[in-house]
Image (cartoon, grey):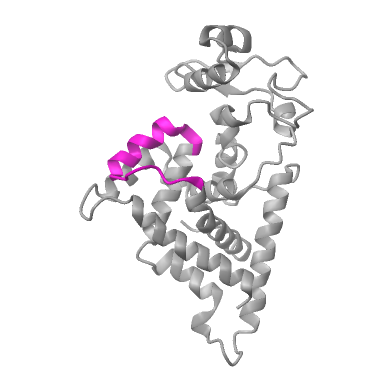
Amino acid sequence: MKEELQQRIHKAQEAMQSLQAILPSPGQKPQETVAEAMNELISQDYEPYFSGNAALHLVSRCRRCGRCCQKELTVAVSFQDCKRIAKHKGISLKRFMKDYTLPHELKGEAVGNARMIRKETGKPCPFYDSTLPGCSIQSVKPQVCSAALYLSKMNLLLCEENRKFSTFSNCPADVELRERIANFSQMLKEEQKQKTTAKETLDGLAANLLAELFQSSPHANLFRLLLRLKGMEKYFGRDTALPLAQKMGLKRLPEDEELKPLAFLFAAMLLEKEASEPALAQ
């Protein structure tokens, strides 16, 4: 097995074991209850696209090219976003709301106290700075910006409707990620061609190890649940994800870095399956 393949799989296996440290004692907080609560927030109909896009989001690397900052027509901000950004800028919440936001274009309970960034027609987001490049409040940017592109509501709707994952040819982060995944998939295919070598049996193939990791491993369901939980955190914010983690009895929310080794391989497997089948089955 190629060294890079071996290292990726080994790191993923280690990550799967490490995740056990945040779990509750056996018998506490049934996972089914948490799964039901998640399904009320994001329908199971969006799987495997919600979890798959959560994985893609985790392993993509924003290049801060500024395209989103310049092209997005509207940017919604929650009350929590406003408090976080105002504190970062060293101004009062009242001043931030007055100078940087407008009432949300939609009404109703679904919107709540969310507002819109005050953005002039044809102009970039007021927090865009071409000298940086990109977002000047990157560390505290709005939740909707943190979730884009993969976990935007529009993208999830498109994935569910088209029964395939979206690609973003104008986003350098997505282009780079697809190349990394394609290179990994090519290594898998090359290894499968060499499966009859004297020292390596079929059981030792990387593809088989991956299938075991995500399907037959006793921790596979746990990983999927934690990945979905992380997706909820990215999509709705930490305030929504924390109660779910507490219902599950977790000691804390999993960190991005803890899930990344697994997320990359999981995303690669889903995209490879999509390439070989007309549409992904749930």
* Residue 222 location, quadrant: bottom left
Let me know if residue 48 appears in the view.
no
Q: Is 254 contained in the magenta span?
A: yes
Q: Position of residue 140 (x, y in %)?
A: 57, 28
The residue drawn where x is 34% and y is 41% is 245
Q: Residue 98 at what x, y percent from top left? A: 58, 6
Please name the predominant secondary structure of the magenta segment in the image. helix
Judge from the rendering whether residue 150 lies leftward or rightward of residue 45; answer left or right.
Answer: right
Q: Nearer the viewer, residue 97 or 23?
A: 23
* Residue situated furthest bottom in the rendering: 198
How many numbered badges does the structure rendering display?
Answer: 0
Q: Quadrant of residue 185?
A: bottom right
For residue 208: magenta?
no
Residue 40: name its quadrant: top left
Percent position of residue 235, x then y = 50, 36
**Residue at the front extreme?**
90
* Residue at 61 percent of width and 66 percent of height: 276
Residue at the extreme left of the image, as rendered: 27
User: Is residue 135 visible in the rendered structure shown here?
Assistant: yes
- Which residue shows up at 57% across the image and 63% down it? 273
**Lateral position of residue 183 relative to residue 248, left or right:** right
* Up/down of 281 relative to 55, above or below: below
Where in the figure is residue 7, as x and y percent of width and height?
Answer: 57, 68
Above-or-below relation of 62 to 73: below
Q: Residue at x 78, y 27 (%)?
A: 130
Which image quarter holds the N terminus? bottom right
| Magenta range | 234-256
